[in-house]
Amino acid sequence: MDCRTKAGCSLMMCLAALLGGCAAPAPFPPVDALPASADLPDPLVMFDGSPVRTRRQWSARRAELAGLFQHYMYGTMPAPPPLRADVRFEDPSYLDGKITLREIAIGLTPDADGPTMHLLVATPNDAEGPVPCFIMPNFGGNHTLVTSEQVAIPAASAPRPRQGQEAESPASPRRGNRPGRCPIDLIVPRGYAVAVFNYREVENDDPAASRGVRTWYARHEGDAGYTWGAVAAWAWGISRGVDWLVTDPRIDPSAIISVGHSRNGKAALVAAAFDERIAMAIPNQSGCGGAGPSRTGDTVSENVEQINRVFPHWFSPVFHQFSDQPERLPFDQHCLIAMVAPRPVLLSCADQDQWANPDGQFRMLQAADKVYRLLGAEGLAADAMPPLEHLIDSPLGYWIRPGRHSLGSAEWDIYIRYADRRLAR
Ligand code: GCU
């Protein structure tokens, strides 16, 4: 990364803000000049080969990894804009008066003409003080999670119709038709807040992106040359939700947990890796580009070539150069997990979802373990993949259940158990 350019400076400011220090500018080599290695790169060895033995050295390595991941995979992203937030409504009567719902419109750009995300925040009314909070991007829109008539239905949120279903029109929204993805009625009475937003409000999920933060910043700060793909944009959106959550007296700012399913699971992990205000990450079935290795070594799970071909807009253009040579990546996804250390990370998997590579995800935890140990944390308390439905609740946590690619109440029960344990509640 080059600090002499506006892009480099902005990236450096962003890194400094997110990582609490400034990494030395590192001009990274072209992809073809990177050494190929079938083995996982050592998270405790700097890019120049020097060893990482102390916490201080790890801080430098973490900043370096943030630069490497942005340069070669997720792309560079802008510094946070100043917080512009507007509480659209507050309803303390939800679920027979047990829950307060608030909707906050958060501006995602310095000027008011850019995209806005609607954060729906549900808090328990019987809490005696600030509560921990799960923040999660959703696919279908906040209105699919609750029946409240007040929840905004932005155009960007209309979910794709399922087979045999009619497309949803703003005139006949299906309010509360998919609560299971994030069962607010079950989570909030257990003493947690929930904050959700529709991922398409931040960045649309389309190779020909025409709206969203990437387009806005390219138009208004084009000289900066941000290279972020959609996954980085969604992760960046999670951090914009956190910008508001940390100002809310009802939320414990030291107990914010990023959760996401599948592509949003990738974003939830990236957000926690880059943003230290996030206390814990729970990526569900995030697979390739998330907690699954890029060096897959099998033919069943998704690989770098497949993900770049089918979803060309998810990563930086540079990442496409690794499609046929992932072994040149100077990191693998264990390094992304290690960037969260010593904060807890729970990888949530399903045995029939081999596309998301549950075994590979477990290997990523094993390879991140040494970083947790260096920082004095327990790491992964398992020598081998656990049996189905056996929660590993160490700081590097793992859960695998029978079944397919999905997220529902059963997962949330585990997430709350894990969060209770790791937050020592
Ligand atoms: C596809 C994609 C995965 C992704 C998933 C999802 O299956 O290949 O990488 O996680 O979609 O987001 O549902």
Image: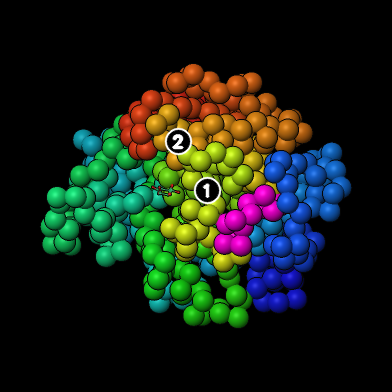
Mark-to-mark CA distance, 1 and 2: 12 Å
On the image, the x and y values in percent for residue 124 come to 35, 36
**In the rendered structure, which segment of residues is drawn in magenta?**
319-330
Q: Which mark is residue 318?
A: none
> Residue beneath label 2, please?
354
| Residue 235 shows in the view | no
Picture residue at 64% right of the left edge, 54% below the top: 325
**Looking at the rendering, which quadrant does residue 323 occupy?**
bottom right
Choose the circle earlier in sequence order: 1 or 2.
1
Q: Considering the image in quadrants, where does the N terminus appear?
A: bottom right
Picture residue at 74% right of the left edge, 71% below the top: 3
On the image, the x and y values in percent for residue 410 come to 35, 28
On the image, the x and y values in percent for residue 222 come to 56, 79
Instruction: Say which of 403 and 135 sits in front.
Output: 403
Residue 107 belongs to the span the image colors magenta? no
The tally of labels here is: 2
Picture residue at 69% right of the left edge, 62% below the top: 31
Mark 1 residue CB less than 8 A from any atom of ligand 1: no
